[in-house]
Amino acid sequence: MKSKIMLVVMSLALLVSGLFMTSHQETVKAEEKKVYQIGTDVTYPPFEFSNSNNTEYIGIDIDIIKAVAKAENFEVKILPLGFSAAVQALDTGQVDGLIAGTTITADREKKMDFGTPYFNTGAVFVTAQSNDAIKSMEDARGKRVAVKTGTAAANYGMEQAKKYGFTVVTFDDTNSMYQDVLTGNSAGLFEDMPVITYAINQGTALKVSSEANTTGQYGFSVKKGENPELLAAFNRGLEKIKQSGEYDQIISRYLGNDALALQKQQKESESTFGGLLKVNGSALLDGLKETMILTVMAIFFATIFGIIFGLMGVVPSKILNGISTTVIYIFRGLPLLVLALFIYTGIPSLTGVRIPAVVAGIITLMFNEGAYTAAFIAGGIKSVDKGQMEAARSLGLPFGKAMRRVVLPQGIKLIIPSFINQFIITLKDTSILSIIGLVELTQTGKIIIARNLEGFKVWAIIALIYLVIITLLTWASNYMERRLNK
């Protein structure tokens, strides 16, 4: 009897031990999952866009890379950079891979290694439904046409421009390109067939006016010569989801008949200002929160930067004066967009060290706004009558104490209104940081518009938000100025 009990106990012990070891092995295995950062463009439906609640990014590309990752037991972190910034981020090593409706071309293959093509596409010529005069590319001969930067349709449009004498204008986002045609600024545009099909089904007043040029293929890519294991895993995973039928389910989810009916329903729910706010209110508040955080942090560091270089510009040292003048000249002279891209993609290409978008954005604003802050700090101090410093020194105060006790208090009165105005400027300048993928208020607007194509209404709401905040800050500036002048 005892031996039987001992046998049962030992069996249970072995079973529990086995389960524990299996569980532990699975936990370790889960913990060891490789995480890859994948750059994408989240304003390119039906391949990349936000869901109706603005809580996650969806689309053919997003679902494919997530399905592949699951099949191959790795994880992905999606970085919504916009197409141009995503391509640069891949080239500089800021991301491990790129999936953004990227057409495989000979030029791109010089810089990227592509996986197995996952979607065949074609470019078409598109015109406004109301424009009866332009029915084909021949009718648009010699006129202006629009394309989106970096797309296969843009390359096709450039080729046709040589034949028909088009004047080609480029846009960074789809909605702006569509609006350029709808308002009559351009005679037509070139777009990928599945993308324009999605837009027309959403109610955009455009029409296809040419046969599709079905020679393009979309491919997942990594930087040339790097991450071969990720590329191999993508190819294996793509084959697996095709064999299982999951690939066809993904395509049908966004291009099938049920998907088109759902898109129309969602479009109708956001056709009014009230509907837009109801669906996207939380996303807009999140974007505003990100804008305010960036603004406050940038002003904090820009103030420190400005005080240091502003004081260097007024101390009795030609060397320090020269350094201050040079720094202010450089960072005031550089366009903010160029500075942001240089910090986010340029520096990593030299150092090999990734810079998070938030950090790059704050550094960009710190340098730019800090240079302006330094200039008005130096100007405010210099505007104080020189006799004040001379009188303080004649009383035996050293330069530092005379500056701190006599000159600075008078200069601060002149600086504070300019400082608040600089806060307003910084708030508006955060919108430029959408170019490096920061989802602040402007980028939030772009993401919403990519899904519902309600450009006028969305930008009107965002403009109103900015105006309200700027009005409050302007009142604060005027109030401070009145108090200081009493």
Image (cartoon, rainbow, N blue to C red):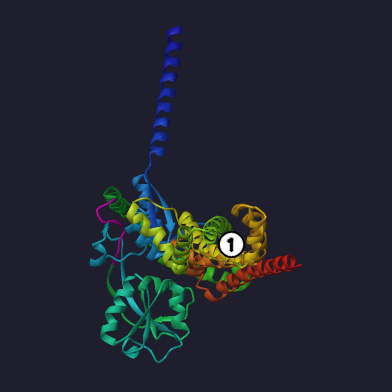
Residue 81: image x %, image y %? 43, 61
Which residues lie in the magenta part?
217-226
Front residue of 214 and 180: 180
Q: Residue at x 53, y 71 (%)?
A: 267
Which of the 4 quarters of the picture holds residue 19?
Answer: top left
Left or right position of 458 against 72: right
Residue 182: image x %, image y %? 46, 83
Front residue of 313 and 266: 313
Residue under label 1:
288
Left or right position of 375 against 70: right
Vertical relation: 380 (above or below) 113? below
Tell me if I can see residue 210 in this picture. yes
Which of the 4 quarters of the picture holds residue 470?
Answer: bottom right
Which of the 4 quarters of the picture holds residue 412?
Answer: bottom right
Vertical relation: 166 (above or below) 349? below
**From this viewpoint, which residue is outermost toward the bottom?**
133
Residue 424: image x %, image y %? 60, 67
- Going by the numbered disc 1, the residue's amino acid type is Leu
Vertical relation: 170 (above or below) 94? below
**From this viewpoint, which residue is outermost toward the top?**
2
Residue 210 lies in the magenta stretch: no
Residue 225 lies in the magenta stretch: yes
Q: Residue at x 57, y 56 (%)?
A: 300
Residue 284: image x %, image y %? 58, 63
Q: Residue at x 66, y 60 (%)?
A: 391
